[in-house]
């Protein structure tokens, strides 16, 4: 049986385990007892002229405990009083000093906790970003642009780094965010208690970012599981996430419990690389559609268009471009057959600079029928493509390319490190594409010259997946500079599309005069931002980036109108309509190397005059 002493010791240990508040309480209690005892002793044994009242005795004892210099004036009292004053001063040095030290330590710990950002935010209608990666420096400016018209908006970030360091990096790379406040909290993205810091129940949308390093998809899946199993007190806001490896897409969707939209970044980036390599300027079009700085995709109900065929509704907006229909059951079709009737409950899918510019016209603009050409569709000849470099996206690039090229086409792969097991699976079953492989250093001038790049219809330069991203981009820039110099010496212009890891390196690469650059992470970040603002766009982008159905193509302008003839853009739309296509813009060859639009004009006004030359292109949605 436990003794009284053991019980008291046990209770004391339990109270001390409560941390700094318990320690402060015990030290304060000991101080009060010590001051009271010494005040009583001084009243009993000291001279009456020293302490005239109990209050003075308590005050004197407290001052001697807190200030060791007070005892220097005790030589006026008796010897007993002097001894008592000295004793309480020694006790004060031990007890009160410890209390002050504990208070200082507790305050310092509290300041450190505040510095780490461990307090729960109190916001409503904010966007929550869970995780920390370079994607954040693309997403935040886009959200700031999207919220520009709002009186106040907030972006809440939960990262696993130091709060002050994350805030400093945001200030350095993002800069001024205007009326949008950025709130940073430090914690684990997969820890439920840390997720509560972002007030997710009142958030407008949630974006889960892929962290850098290996197994980033595993972290995304874990975060989605934490969000799915969370006890939501209100309506669950839209959740947007992305995976790098297509093999992890099913697991991420399962972890999201049907409440999250998961973007397959590997698949989308691979498709864009292939499609852009075959039609320069496509990445500029996609970037314009995905960011909030130019034209965007909107959905709008138009009762006045009910009963009209889609082909006639193409001319219904003066400063917006109709591209498809979202039916009442949620299904989406882009560039439907021109005789498709618009039904009650359908929403128009349009491209516009802002939703305020989407207005029906009073009358259709004039169409110059004499300017419309009627070319005969020619079968596509076999194509020769050169692929420089290798990374995890390369197998998908090869597979996607095989779906677009004609029979008899060839692909030559040249890279320093090529995974043979991937090639064996790829080459088996490719009916339209013959694959040839050569191991070489793509930054070596002699090795590049031996490949004879001038004989290829398309050249794709991939970022080396075995290197650190910045170093891989540096090697890509060296390869592009070699190709540019080789082309200038031989008088040839190589059609080159390059993949970049960092958008800042893309801007450096413009000096190489490559036809186009694809920055996969940036495009995926833009896509996730669009979905966070309007989740219904997920079906639109799925349709747009799918190999089946209609996609974005840049086709010769001579297939639509006579070169050099000035017509309204409505005439171009009418010509495309005759081919079962939806025209949404054009690209001028003379401006194809001028940033930032590189000659791309998206969503021009229907009445705007257009003069297209023999090398210009028309941007259309088409089946092929």
Image: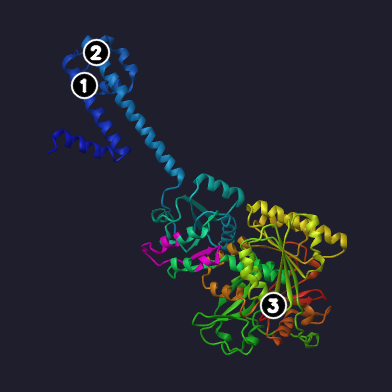
Foreground: disc 1 or disc 3? 3
With 50 as the anchor, is 208 left or right in this view?
Answer: right
Asked where in the image residue 33 lies, by quadrant, the reply is top left
Asked where in the image residue 524 lies, by quadrant, the reply is bottom right
Task: Classify mark 2: residues with Cα within 10 Å, few (<14), some (14-19) or many (20+).
Answer: some
Whole-percent x, y for residue 473 in the image: 68, 55
Whether 231 is among the magenta residues is yes
Q: How far apart, in angstroms, are the residues tagged by discs 1 and 3?
A: 101 Å
The tally of labels here is: 3
Q: Which residue is mark 3?
A: 432
Q: In the rendered structure, which disc, 3 or 2, sits on the residue that comes first in sequence?
A: 2
With 358 as the anchor, is 564 left or right in this view?
Answer: right
Quadrant placement of the N terminus: top left
Q: In the rendered structure, which disc, 2 or 1, sits on the residue that comes first in sequence?
A: 1
Task: Classify mark 3: residues with Cα within 10 Å, few (<14), some (14-19) or many (20+).
Answer: some
Q: Determine if residue 128 is in view.
A: no
Dot 3: element: loop
Task: Classify mark 1: residues with Cα within 10 Å, few (<14), some (14-19) or many (20+).
Answer: many
Q: Which residue is mark 1?
A: 39
Q: Is residue 294 above or below residue 309?
A: above
With 462 as the anchor, is 258 left or right in this view?
Answer: left
> Closest to the observer: 294 or 516?
516
Dot 1: element: helix
Q: Please state the extent of the stretch shown in magenta in the rendering.
A: 222-249
Label annotation for residue 414: none
Q: How far apart, in angstroms, are the residues tagged by discs 3 and 2?
A: 105 Å
């Amino acid at each position: 049986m436990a003794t009284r002493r053991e019980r008291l010791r046990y209770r004391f240990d339990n109270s001390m385990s409560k941390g700094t508040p318990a320690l402060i309480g015990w030290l304060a209690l000991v101080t009060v007892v010590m001051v009271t005892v010494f005040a009583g002793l001084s009243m009993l044994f000291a001279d009456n002229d020293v302490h005239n009242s109990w209050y003075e005795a308590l005050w004197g004892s407290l001052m001697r405990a807190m200030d060791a210099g007070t005892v220097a004036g005790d030589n006026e009292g008796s010897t007993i009083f002097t001894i008592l004053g000295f004793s309480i001063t020694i006790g004060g040095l031990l007890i009160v000093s410890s209390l002050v030290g504990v208070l200082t330590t507790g305050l310092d710990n509290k300041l450190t906790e505040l510095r780490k950002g461990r307090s729960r935010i109190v916001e409503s209608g904010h966007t929550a970003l869970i995780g920390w990666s370079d994607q954040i420096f693309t997403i935040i400016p886009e959200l700031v642009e999207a919220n520009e018209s709002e009186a106040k908006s907030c972006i809440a970030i939960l990262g696993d780094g130091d709060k002050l360091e994350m805030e400093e990096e945001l200030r350095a790379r993002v800069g001024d965010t205007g009326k949008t406040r950025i709130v940073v909290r430090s914690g684990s993205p997969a820890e439920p208690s840390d997720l509560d810091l972002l007030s997710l129940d009142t958030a407008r949308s949630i974006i889960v970012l892929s962290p850098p390093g290996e197994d980033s998809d595993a972290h995304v899946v874990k975060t989605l599981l934490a969000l799915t199993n969370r006890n939501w007190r209100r309506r669950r806001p839209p959740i947007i996430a992305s995976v790098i490896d297509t093999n992890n897409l099913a697991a991420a969707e399962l972890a999201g419990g049907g409440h999250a939209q998961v973007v397959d970044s590997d698949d989308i980036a691979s498709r864009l690389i292939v499609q852009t390599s075959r039609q320069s300027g496509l990445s500029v079009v996609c970037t314009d559609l995905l960011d909030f700085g130019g034209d965007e995709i909107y959905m709008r109900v138009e009762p006045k268009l009910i009963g009209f065929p889609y082909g006639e509704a193409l001319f219904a907006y003066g400063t917006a471009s109709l591209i498809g229909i979202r039916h009442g059951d949620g299904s989406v079709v882009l560039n439907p057959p021109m005789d498709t009737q618009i039904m009650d409950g359908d929403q128009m899918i349009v491209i516009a600079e802002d939703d305020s510019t989407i207005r029906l016209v009073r009358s259709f603009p004039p169409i110059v029928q004499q300017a419309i050409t009627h070319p005969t569709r020619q079968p596509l000849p076999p194509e020769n493509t050169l692929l420089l470099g290798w990374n995890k996206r390369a197998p998908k690039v090869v597979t996607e390319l095989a779906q677009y090229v004609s029979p008899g086409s060839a692909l030559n792969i040249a890279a320093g490190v090529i995974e043979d097991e991937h090639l064996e699976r790829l080459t088996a079953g490719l009916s339209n594409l013959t694959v040839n492989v050569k191991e070489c250093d793509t930054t070596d001038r002699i090795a590049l010259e031996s490949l004879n790049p001038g004989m290829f219809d398309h050249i794709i330069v991939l970022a080396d997946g075995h290197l650190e991203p910045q170093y891989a981009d540096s090697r890509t820039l060296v390869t592009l500079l070699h190709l540019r110099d080789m082309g200038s010496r031989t008088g040839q212009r190589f059609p080159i599309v390059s993949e970049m890891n960092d958008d800042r390196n893309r801007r450096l690469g413009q000096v190489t005069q490559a036809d186009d650059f694809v920055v996969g992470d940036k495009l995926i970040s833009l896509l996730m931002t669009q979905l966070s603002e309007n989740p219904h766009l997920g079906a639109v982008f799925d349709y747009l980036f799918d190999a089946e159905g209609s996609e974005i193509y840049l086709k010769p302008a001579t297939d639509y109108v006579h070169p050099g003839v000035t017509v309204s853009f409505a005439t171009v739309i009418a010509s495309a309509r005759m081919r079962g296509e939806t025209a949404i813009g054009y690209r001028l060859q003379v401006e194809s190397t001028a940033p930032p639009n590189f000659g791309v004009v998206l969503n021009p006004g229907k009445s705007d005059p257009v003069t297209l030359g023999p090398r210009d292109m028309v941007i259309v949605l088409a089946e092929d």
